[in-house]
């Protein structure tokens, strides 16, 4: 997908989410809505979901896709790297990422975006996997950061 088309699609998703997320304050309901829309509007999203940071564990939250790891081992994988570095991680080839957690062997690339509260503390991550190499870029990072800020 070319850059303009991708930005336009993300903008439309953000506009839709802005309208529908204000009906509840429940974070799980908001996450489920966000994941459902992203997963079905972005054709290269193979698995889309949240891992919630609960008592220093990353526990599975709302997601779309096949079965997932329920609890990610501490300080391993891309999700924990995003938490520990406090930044979005774009991984073009997960097989080249030291410590990658393979919940599904078909995953080839990944992006993980930290979700921060008003104090700047991370409370979850949005994890998106693709079954193709090099699926994610800086546009995905920028736009997904704007989207998770809606939570």
Image: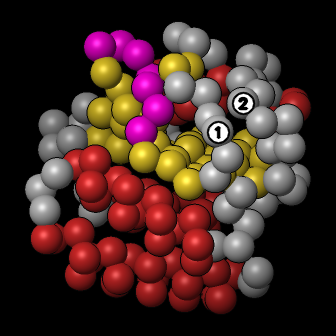
Q: Is residue 7 magenta?
A: no
Q: Is residue 43 left or right of residue 51?
A: right
Q: Quadrant of the C terminus?
A: bottom left
Image x and y of residue 146, in percent: 39, 64
Q: Quadrant of the N terminus?
A: bottom right
Residue at the (74%, 17%) spot, across then down: 99
Q: How is the image coloured?
A: secondary structure
Task: Tell me if mark 1 has few (under 14), some (14-19) or many (20+) residues whose alpha carbon lies within 10 angstroms of its own.
Answer: few
Q: Earlier in the sequence, mark 1 or mark 2?
A: 1
Residue at the (71%, 57%) spot, across then down: 46
Disc number placed over residue 67 in the picture, else none: 1
Residue at the (46%, 59%) spot, across then down: 35
Residue at the (79%, 20%) spot, across then down: 98
- Position of residue 63 relative to residue 67, above or below, is below
Q: Is residue 90 visible?
A: no
Image x and y of residue 106, in percent: 86, 43
Image x and y of residue 85, in percent: 50, 27
Q: Are marks 1 and 2 in contact (CB under 8 Å)?
A: yes
Most frequent secondary structure within the magenta stretch: strand
Disc number placed over residue 21 in the picture, else none: none
Whole-number angstrom distance, CA of label 1 to CA of label 2:
8 Å
Q: Is residue 94 left or right of residue 127?
A: right
- Position of residue 115 relative to residue 51, above or below, is below
- Name the residue that disc number 2 marks: 103
Task: Tell me if mark 2 has few (under 14), some (14-19) or many (20+) residues whose alpha carbon lies within 10 angstroms of its own.
Answer: few
Q: Is residue 76 visible?
A: yes
Q: Which residues are magenta?
A: 55-61
- Position of residue 99 relative to residue 2, above or below, is above
Q: Is residue 60 magenta?
A: yes
């Amino acid at each position: 997908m070319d850059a303009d088309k991708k930005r336009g699609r993300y903008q439309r998703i953000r506009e839709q989410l802005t309208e529908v997320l204000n009906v509840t304050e429940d974070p799980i309901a908001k996450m489920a809505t966000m994941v459902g829309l992203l997963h079905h509007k972005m054709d290269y999203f193979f698995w889309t979901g949240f891992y919630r940071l609960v008592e220093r564990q990353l526990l599975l939250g709302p997601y779309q896709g096949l079965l997932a790891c329920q609890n990610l081992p501490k300080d391993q994988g891309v999700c924990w790297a995003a938490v520990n570095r406090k930044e979005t991680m774009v991984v073009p080839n997960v097989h080249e990422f030291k410590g990658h957690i393979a919940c599904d062997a078909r995953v080839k690339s990944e992006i993980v975006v930290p979700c921060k509260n008003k104090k700047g503390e991370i409370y979850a991550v949005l994890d998106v996997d693709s079954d193709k190499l090099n699926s994610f870029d800086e546009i995905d990072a920028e736009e997904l950061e704007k989207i998770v800020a809606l939570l």
